[in-house]
Image (tube, coloured by chain):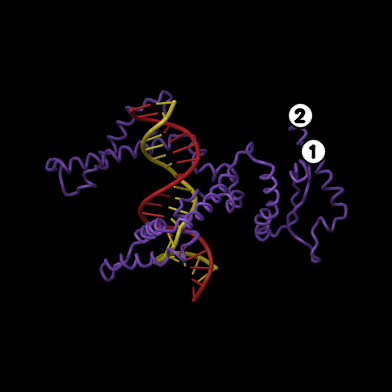
Chain colours: A purple, B yellow, C red
DNA sequence: ATACCCCAACGCGGTTCTGA
DNA sequence: TCAGAACCGCGTTGGGGTAT
């Protein structure tokens, strides 16, 4: 069954889906398996009705989401898909991640010295309440950790909170900068990205060289913000000779026969872009 | 017009599992 | 034996579709 309609009239579609679903997986059976419809109390009827309503709502969302053609380009997933995932992975170190809450940043900064003891005390307290052989579930444990972090943070000095807020602002700003549209990017953004090129290429090409047994030479270039936008070319060499020399160092005419023609090629590209 | 809802991913810390 | 991955549940995120 699919959810598609140019008129967006789904009334009969929903009626069919919801009816079939409740016939096949009756809410009463899952909620009160030992009871029949006829001997329910008023409260139980209300309980079942609410559960059915919740299921209906969830069903609608499920179908809508899967019928939504733009699902792969929206929401959080947009940041993960659409470009080469391998390259994306390399950039993730710097750009990925969501904005944190204040208490999460507080935990990052002070877990060991300010929070850990409280968490351990709380876990010990909760464990005492259990039967001798019983252990806290991982979920419960995590719930305790998170709620304790929040409690400790709420009790914390205002000075500490201020530092946390500053670090949080810094952190969140970095995330926002990382997902800027090209039109919003400043020369400083480009310059920083160019500076990072060697590190990024090393991250990709070193393991690739180990896997393939090959060596790599990358030619790159474009407008250089550091030189007033002048077209500049550069190379990245992965692999050196026994004497520790790169291809660019062993080939004396590398600049003349590689970099210079490549710069001319780049100038052609960027001139075309400027011309109407 | 806009409020609301939901999606999948990610973040948290500690434990358990898996594979080298 | 050890390192690293997977897992746990809840809260949060940005954005698009739907309902009002």
From this view, report whether residue A240 is shown above or below residue A72: below
Q: Name the residue under label 2.
A: A275
The quarter holding residue A146 reads: bottom left
What is the distance, in whole Å, between disc 1 and disc 2 at their CAs?
A: 12 Å
Above or below for A42 versus A275: below
Residue A234, position as x, y percentages in the image? 77, 49
Location of residue A172 in the rendering, given as x and y in whole percent from the top left corner: 53, 48
Residue A267: assigned label: 1
Q: Which chain carries label 1?
A: A
Residue at 59 percent of width and 48 percent of height: A88
Residue A250 at x, y percent in the picture: 84, 58
Q: What element carries label 2?
A: loop
Quarter-wise, where is residue A137 in the image?
bottom left
Residue A228 in the figure: left or right of residue A128: right
In the picture, measured across the screen, residue A221 lies left or right of residue A30, that is: right
Q: How many marks?
A: 2
Q: In the rendered structure, the residue with mark 2 lies on which chain?
A: A
Location of residue C7 with respect to A243 vertically, above or below: above
Q: Which residue is depicted at the point 48% across and 62% down?
A: A110
- Residue B7 vs A134, above or below: the answer is above
Measuring 22% from the left and 46% from the top, which residue is drawn there? A29
- Decide which of A45, A105 is in the foreground and name it: A105
Q: What residue occupies the far left of the structure in this picture?
A: A39
Q: In terms of depth relative to the viewer, which is nearer, A159 or A68?
A: A159
Quarter containing the C terminus of chain A: top right
Question: Few, some or many C-alpha atoms within 10 Å of disc 2 (few <14, some 14-19, many ≥20)?
Answer: few
Q: Which residue is pictured at 16% across the width and 43% down the height?
A: A43
């Amino acid at each position: 069954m699919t959810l598609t309609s140019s008129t967006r009239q789904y009334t009969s579609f929903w009626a069919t889906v919801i009816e079939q679903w409740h016939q096949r997986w009756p809410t009463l059976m899952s909620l009160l398996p030992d009871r029949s419809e006829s001997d329910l109390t008023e409260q139980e009827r209300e309980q079942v009705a609410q559960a059915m309503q919740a299921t209906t709502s969830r069903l609608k969302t499920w179908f809508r989401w899967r019928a939504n053609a733009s699902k792969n380009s929206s929401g959080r997933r947009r940041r993960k898909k659409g470009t080469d995932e391998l390259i994306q992975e390399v950039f993730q170190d710097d750009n990925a991640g969501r904005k944190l809450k204040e208490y999460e940043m507080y935990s990052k900064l002070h877990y060991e010295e300010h929070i850990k003891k409280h968490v351990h005390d709380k876990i010990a307290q909760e464990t005492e309440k259990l039967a001798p052989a019983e252990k806290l579930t991982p979920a419960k444990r995590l719930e305790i950790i998170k709620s304790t972090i929040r409690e400790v943070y709420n009790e914390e000095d205002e000075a500490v909170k201020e530092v946390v807020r500053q670090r949080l602002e810094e952190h969140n700003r970095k995330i926002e900068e990382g997902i800027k549209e090209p039109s919003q990017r400043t020369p400083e953004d480009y310059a920083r990205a160019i500076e990072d090129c060697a590190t990024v290429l090393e991250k990709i090409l070193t393991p690739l060289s180990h896997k393939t047994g090959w060596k790599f030479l990358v030619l790159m270039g474009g407008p250089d913000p550091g030189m007033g936008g002048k077209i500049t070319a550069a190379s990245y060499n992965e692999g050196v000779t026994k004497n520790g020399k790169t291809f660019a160092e062993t080939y004396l005419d590398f600049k003349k026969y590689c970099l210079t023609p490549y710069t001319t090629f780049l100038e052609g590209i960027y001139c075309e872009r400027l011309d109407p």
